Image (spheres, rainbow, N blue to C red):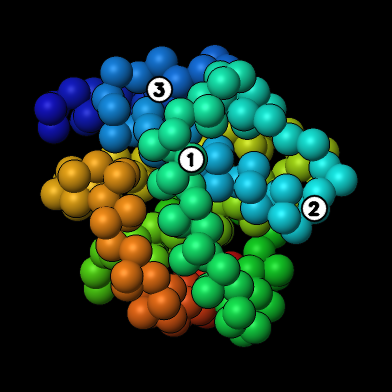
Amino acid sequence: MADSRKEEEKNGGGGREPQGAEGGEDVCDDPILEQGAVVLRGYVIERINTEDPDRNVSSVDLGGRPNEQQDPNIKEVVEQLLRIADEMNRNAELQHLISQVQGNCAQDIFMQVARSIFADGINWGRVVALFHLAYRLIHKALTTNHLENIRLVISWVLQVIRDTLYSWIVQQGGWEGVIRGFSRWRTVAIVASVALVAAFVYYRKTR
Protein backbone atom coordinates (compact mmCIF):
# COMPACT_ATOMS: atom_id res chain seq x y z
CA MET A 1 0.00 0.00 0.00
CA ALA A 2 2.78 2.38 0.95
CA ASP A 3 4.65 1.50 -2.27
CA SER A 4 1.61 2.24 -4.40
CA ARG A 5 1.18 5.65 -2.73
CA LYS A 6 4.86 6.43 -3.38
CA GLU A 7 4.40 5.43 -7.01
CA GLU A 8 1.36 7.72 -7.26
CA GLU A 9 3.31 10.65 -5.88
CA LYS A 10 6.22 9.92 -8.24
CA ASN A 11 3.85 10.04 -11.19
CA GLY A 12 2.25 13.28 -10.01
CA GLY A 13 -0.65 11.55 -8.28
CA GLY A 14 -0.04 13.29 -4.97
CA GLY A 15 -2.06 16.28 -6.16
CA ARG A 16 -4.73 14.24 -7.94
CA GLU A 17 -8.30 14.29 -6.78
CA PRO A 18 -9.27 11.09 -4.95
CA GLN A 19 -11.80 9.05 -6.84
CA GLY A 20 -15.25 10.12 -5.85
CA ALA A 21 -14.51 13.79 -6.27
CA GLU A 22 -14.25 13.84 -10.04
CA GLY A 23 -16.26 12.82 -13.07
CA GLY A 24 -19.54 14.16 -11.70
CA GLU A 25 -20.18 11.13 -9.53
CA ASP A 26 -18.55 9.15 -6.75
CA VAL A 27 -16.83 6.24 -8.41
CA CYS A 28 -14.77 4.92 -5.51
CA ASP A 29 -15.68 1.60 -3.93
CA ASP A 30 -14.72 2.64 -0.41
CA PRO A 31 -17.92 3.29 1.59
CA ILE A 32 -16.24 5.64 4.11
CA LEU A 33 -14.87 7.93 1.41
CA GLU A 34 -17.92 7.69 -0.81
CA GLN A 35 -20.35 8.42 2.01
CA GLY A 36 -18.04 11.16 3.29
CA ALA A 37 -18.26 12.95 -0.06
CA VAL A 38 -22.07 12.62 -0.09
CA VAL A 39 -22.36 13.87 3.51
CA LEU A 40 -20.06 16.82 2.77
CA ARG A 41 -22.15 17.80 -0.24
CA GLY A 42 -25.30 17.51 1.85
CA TYR A 43 -23.75 19.71 4.53
CA VAL A 44 -22.73 22.34 1.96
CA ILE A 45 -26.18 22.34 0.32
CA GLU A 46 -28.01 22.77 3.63
CA ARG A 47 -25.72 25.56 4.79
CA ILE A 48 -26.22 27.39 1.52
CA ASN A 49 -29.99 26.91 1.80
CA THR A 50 -29.82 28.54 5.24
CA GLU A 51 -27.31 31.33 4.62
CA ASP A 52 -27.86 32.08 0.92
CA PRO A 53 -31.41 30.83 0.15
CA ASP A 54 -31.61 32.59 -3.23
CA ARG A 55 -28.78 30.42 -4.54
CA ASN A 56 -30.00 27.09 -5.88
CA VAL A 57 -27.31 24.43 -5.52
CA SER A 58 -27.73 20.70 -6.12
CA SER A 59 -25.53 17.65 -5.54
CA VAL A 60 -24.83 17.57 -9.27
CA ASP A 61 -23.42 21.11 -9.08
CA LEU A 62 -20.98 19.80 -6.46
CA GLY A 63 -19.95 16.74 -8.47
CA GLY A 64 -22.44 14.25 -7.02
CA ARG A 65 -25.44 12.21 -8.17
CA PRO A 66 -28.94 13.66 -8.54
CA ASN A 67 -30.69 11.68 -5.78
CA GLU A 68 -27.86 10.96 -3.37
CA GLN A 69 -29.28 13.20 -0.63
CA GLN A 70 -32.53 11.22 -0.50
CA ASP A 71 -30.96 8.42 1.56
CA PRO A 72 -32.54 8.66 5.08
CA ASN A 73 -29.23 7.75 6.77
CA ILE A 74 -27.41 10.50 4.88
CA LYS A 75 -30.11 13.00 5.83
CA GLU A 76 -29.84 12.09 9.51
CA VAL A 77 -26.03 12.31 9.54
CA VAL A 78 -26.14 15.70 7.81
CA GLU A 79 -28.77 16.96 10.29
CA GLN A 80 -26.61 15.98 13.26
CA LEU A 81 -23.54 17.67 11.78
CA LEU A 82 -25.58 20.82 11.14
CA ARG A 83 -26.68 20.91 14.78
CA ILE A 84 -23.04 20.88 15.85
CA ALA A 85 -22.32 23.61 13.28
CA ASP A 86 -25.13 25.77 14.66
CA GLU A 87 -23.32 25.86 17.99
CA MET A 88 -20.04 26.71 16.30
CA ASN A 89 -21.67 29.53 14.34
CA ARG A 90 -22.30 31.37 17.60
CA ASN A 91 -18.54 31.93 17.93
CA ALA A 92 -18.08 35.46 16.54
CA GLU A 93 -14.28 35.23 16.45
CA LEU A 94 -14.49 32.01 14.45
CA GLN A 95 -16.85 33.56 11.90
CA HIS A 96 -14.59 36.61 11.54
CA LEU A 97 -11.54 34.43 10.90
CA ILE A 98 -13.36 32.20 8.40
CA SER A 99 -14.53 35.26 6.45
CA GLN A 100 -10.90 36.20 5.82
CA VAL A 101 -9.95 32.93 4.09
CA GLN A 102 -9.33 33.44 0.40
CA GLY A 103 -11.57 31.35 -1.84
CA ASN A 104 -8.61 30.35 -3.98
CA CYS A 105 -6.33 29.28 -1.12
CA ALA A 106 -3.70 26.73 -2.12
CA GLN A 107 -3.93 23.04 -1.24
CA ASP A 108 -0.90 23.21 1.05
CA ILE A 109 -2.52 25.98 3.10
CA PHE A 110 -5.78 24.01 3.33
CA MET A 111 -3.89 20.91 4.48
CA GLN A 112 -1.92 22.90 7.07
CA VAL A 113 -5.15 24.25 8.53
CA ALA A 114 -6.74 20.77 8.47
CA ARG A 115 -3.74 19.25 10.26
CA SER A 116 -3.96 22.01 12.85
CA ILE A 117 -7.65 21.23 13.48
CA PHE A 118 -6.84 17.59 14.28
CA ALA A 119 -3.41 18.16 15.84
CA ASP A 120 -4.45 17.13 19.36
CA GLY A 121 -7.37 14.82 18.75
CA ILE A 122 -10.38 13.87 16.63
CA ASN A 123 -14.07 14.23 17.46
CA TRP A 124 -17.20 14.95 15.47
CA GLY A 125 -16.98 18.65 16.26
CA ARG A 126 -13.58 18.83 14.62
CA VAL A 127 -14.92 16.93 11.62
CA VAL A 128 -17.63 19.58 11.38
CA ALA A 129 -14.93 22.25 11.63
CA LEU A 130 -13.27 20.72 8.57
CA PHE A 131 -16.60 20.58 6.73
CA HIS A 132 -17.33 24.18 7.72
CA LEU A 133 -14.01 25.34 6.29
CA ALA A 134 -14.76 23.45 3.06
CA TYR A 135 -18.25 24.95 2.92
CA ARG A 136 -16.89 28.48 3.19
CA LEU A 137 -14.40 27.87 0.39
CA ILE A 138 -17.05 26.22 -1.82
CA HIS A 139 -19.49 29.07 -1.17
CA LYS A 140 -16.80 31.57 -2.15
CA ALA A 141 -16.13 29.57 -5.32
CA LEU A 142 -19.83 29.74 -6.17
CA THR A 143 -20.22 33.45 -5.47
CA THR A 144 -17.04 34.40 -7.36
CA ASN A 145 -17.78 32.01 -10.26
CA HIS A 146 -14.61 29.97 -9.70
CA LEU A 147 -16.54 26.73 -10.13
CA GLU A 148 -13.40 24.73 -10.89
CA ASN A 149 -12.43 25.12 -7.21
CA ILE A 150 -15.47 23.24 -5.93
CA ARG A 151 -14.29 19.74 -6.76
CA LEU A 152 -10.76 20.65 -5.76
CA VAL A 153 -11.93 21.53 -2.24
CA ILE A 154 -14.03 18.35 -2.01
CA SER A 155 -11.03 16.29 -3.11
CA TRP A 156 -8.89 17.95 -0.41
CA VAL A 157 -11.46 17.02 2.25
CA LEU A 158 -11.50 13.43 0.98
CA GLN A 159 -7.72 13.35 1.22
CA VAL A 160 -7.90 14.48 4.86
CA ILE A 161 -10.54 11.82 5.55
CA ARG A 162 -8.40 9.14 3.90
CA ASP A 163 -5.09 10.15 5.49
CA THR A 164 -6.15 11.39 8.95
CA LEU A 165 -9.74 10.45 9.84
CA TYR A 166 -10.33 7.10 8.18
CA SER A 167 -9.44 4.76 11.06
CA TRP A 168 -11.25 6.94 13.60
CA ILE A 169 -14.45 7.03 11.53
CA VAL A 170 -14.31 3.23 11.18
CA GLN A 171 -13.95 2.96 14.97
CA GLN A 172 -17.11 5.08 15.37
CA GLY A 173 -19.03 2.62 13.24
CA GLY A 174 -18.94 4.81 10.15
CA TRP A 175 -20.55 8.20 9.56
CA GLU A 176 -23.65 7.10 11.45
CA GLY A 177 -21.52 7.29 14.60
CA VAL A 178 -22.33 10.99 14.88
CA ILE A 179 -25.98 10.08 15.46
CA ARG A 180 -25.13 8.06 18.56
CA GLY A 181 -23.08 10.93 19.99
CA PHE A 182 -25.86 13.52 19.85
CA SER A 183 -25.85 14.15 23.61
CA ARG A 184 -22.37 15.71 23.36
CA TRP A 185 -23.23 18.23 20.63
CA ARG A 186 -22.72 21.35 22.69
CA THR A 187 -19.46 20.31 24.35
CA VAL A 188 -18.04 18.98 21.09
CA ALA A 189 -19.02 22.15 19.22
CA ILE A 190 -17.38 24.43 21.79
CA VAL A 191 -14.15 22.41 21.71
CA ALA A 192 -14.22 22.39 17.90
CA SER A 193 -14.73 26.16 17.80
CA VAL A 194 -11.60 26.63 19.87
CA ALA A 195 -9.69 24.22 17.62
CA LEU A 196 -10.82 25.97 14.45
CA VAL A 197 -10.00 29.44 15.81
CA ALA A 198 -6.51 28.16 16.65
CA ALA A 199 -6.23 26.67 13.16
CA PHE A 200 -7.15 29.96 11.52
CA VAL A 201 -4.71 31.87 13.67
CA TYR A 202 -2.09 29.42 12.38
CA TYR A 203 -3.35 29.95 8.82
CA ARG A 204 -2.99 33.73 9.11
CA LYS A 205 0.57 33.39 10.37
CA THR A 206 1.57 31.14 7.46
CA ARG A 207 -0.14 32.96 4.56
Tell whether label 3 touches label 1 (CB within 8 Å).
Answer: no
Q: Is residue 49 left or right of residue 1?
A: right
Whether residue 17 is visible here, answered yes or no, is: no
Q: Which residue is mark 2?
A: 52
Q: Residue at x 58, y 32 (%)?
A: 151
Whether residue 79 is visible here, answered yes or no, is: yes
Q: Residue at x 31, y 44 (%)?
A: 175
* Badge number at residue 61: none
Up/down of 23 relative to 21, above or below: above
Q: Nearer the viewer, mark 2 or mark 3?
A: 2
Q: Is residue 53 left or right of residue 18?
A: right
Q: Is residue 23 left or right of residue 149?
A: left
Local SS, label 3 = loop
Q: Inspect the image, locate mark 2, and give the three-letter code of the amino acid beneath it.
A: Asp
Quadrant of the frame with the C terminus: bottom right
Which one is earlier in the sequence, the residue at label 1 or at label 3?
3
Tell whether label 3 touches label 2 (CB within 8 Å).
Answer: no
Which residue is at the front of the view, 185 or 65?
185
Up/down of 121 relative to 18, above or below: below
Q: Residue at x 63, y 69 (%)?
A: 98
Q: Inspect the image, locate mark 3, and give the three-letter code of the amino acid beneath it.
A: Gln
Q: Inspect the image, locate mark 1, and give the three-letter code of the amino acid beneath it.
A: Lys
Q: Position of residue 143 (x, y in %)?
A: 82, 46
Up/down of 141 relative to 3, above or below: below
Q: Position of residue 40 (x, y in %)?
A: 50, 42
Question: Whole-Å distance between the Cαs marked 1 and 2?
Answer: 20 Å
Q: Which residue is mark 3?
A: 19
Q: Position of residue 120 (x, y in %)?
A: 25, 73
Q: Which residue is mark 1?
A: 75
